[in-house]
Image (tube, grey):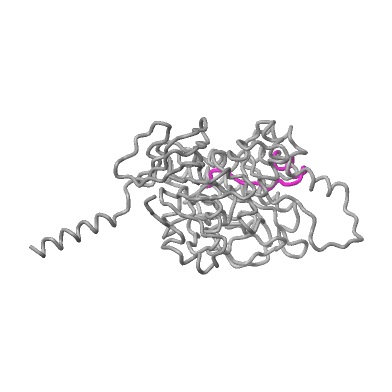
Amino acid sequence: MQKILSLLLLGCGLLLAQPPSGIAIRNARIVTGSGPILQKGTVVLRNGLIDAVGENVTIPTDAWVINGEGMTVYPGLIDALSTIGITDAAATPGSARPAATPGAPAATVSRGPEDRPLTTSWLKAADLINTTDRRIESARNQGFTSAITWPRRGIFAGQGAVINLAGDKSNDMIIVPSTGQYLALVNGGFGAGYPASLMGSISYIRQIYVDADRYARIKKQYADNPRGLNRPEYDRALEGVLESQRLLLPANRRVEITRMISFSKELKRPTVLYGLQEGYLALDALQAAGLPVLINLKWPEKAREVDPENIESLKVLEVRDKAATTPAELAKKGVKFAFYADGIDQPADILKAVRKAMQAGLSEADALKAMTITPAEIFGFADRLGSIEKGKIGNLVVTKGGIFDEKPAIQHVFIDGVKYDPAPDTQTPAAAGARATGGGKEQEQQ
């Protein structure tokens, strides 16, 4: 009898130890991102997905319940152009022959386009994710639940991936394994080999796409009727280009914006422009082009160490003053834009940069869209992320006060329906990394 009782108690203990099959956040203000704001609603998460959202939601009896009174629930934030998770993929400014990326050819002086200089188009960010990257947890603590991360070395750097910022294995983090090809205009100057100039870089990109079109035609011809034809030689650089659904082109200054708009028409590929800090100077051109854009939140600022005798030009001062107006002006023109945070070291400074754009005229609703649903639309995964809707992935941010407040109080972050509570600011990095299994993962009954 005693043995039976012990087994029953053990069975009850195991049942109590099981994670909940659902989590409900009730009586919270819910900013859905795709519909009206619910002033007092409920969100139910089950099996990693949003199971229900609304003002009159029946909470499952087996769900853990979080009292959301006085809290606001937002869709998880998305960084639209990042290197998070790829620990050695950051670009090396001004470098003609960047350090090796895994899988890249050895750095040599190129003699011409046939050498495929600075090209690793076949690389996939999805294959390079390192779950130990400390930036993953840092970004998550600031409300970011996803990022579109990219290899960043060379001209054709490789293919981006949409990742969730949590997971015990890199495979767990991948949402979309290939989102497009990252391009940059880099060169080493004369004497460093081809391409040695901006014109050379543009010519090289043009040649790659000419070669890719020819390569695709030959492959199709051979696949349709191979008899009597020599098989086409495999070219992994062109395979990577053809596989890419869209391309990213750099366009920060006004002249670059107009140049890349024209170049995108020539290449005839779906294109996204990135940079755009002088976008306020090219509003009509951007509106007419209809291209989506990614705006860098690293606003121009005066260098900390500068020669006091050096008088800055009126142009420099104007860009520093006006750059943050670009998002508001693009919103007025109906140009689709998303934010990214290249060059901002501290994740907390990202929302500070967004507030600067809001002070320059950007509405809170448009600011939130630029960090949630719009990047999802631009890169084709809005059916999975970007808003709080039934059936989408359970990525949420729960705050006290507004997420764009000067000091946002982030209470909980949900990724794939799992709750992560940000580490207190006073914790040391070592303690923060060890505070819970999975770098802050928690499943607690509220």
In front: 394, or 221?
A: 394
- 271 vs 181: above or below: above
Q: State the extent of the magenta-drawn residues as a range.
A: 244-261
Q: Quadrant of residue 337?
A: top right
In front: 18, or 9?
A: 9
Residue 295 seen in the figure: yes
Residue 115 seen in the figure: no
In magenta segment, residue 245: yes
In magenta segment, residue 11: no
In front: 425, or 178?
A: 425
Q: Residue furthest front?
A: 69
Q: Quadrant of residue 335?
A: top right
x 46%, y 67%: residue? 434
138 sits left or right of 264 in the view: left
- 357 vs 346: above or below: above
Q: Residue furthest bottom?
A: 430
x 49%, y 54%: residue? 165
How far from the left and from the top, in percent, is residue 248? Answer: 62, 46
- 117 vs 361: above or below: below
How far from the left and from the top, in percent, is residue 215? Answer: 54, 47
How far from the left and from the top, in percent, is residue 36? Answer: 52, 30
- Callout count: 0
How far from the left and from the top, in percent, is residue 24? Answer: 39, 43
Q: Quadrant of the N terminus?
A: bottom left
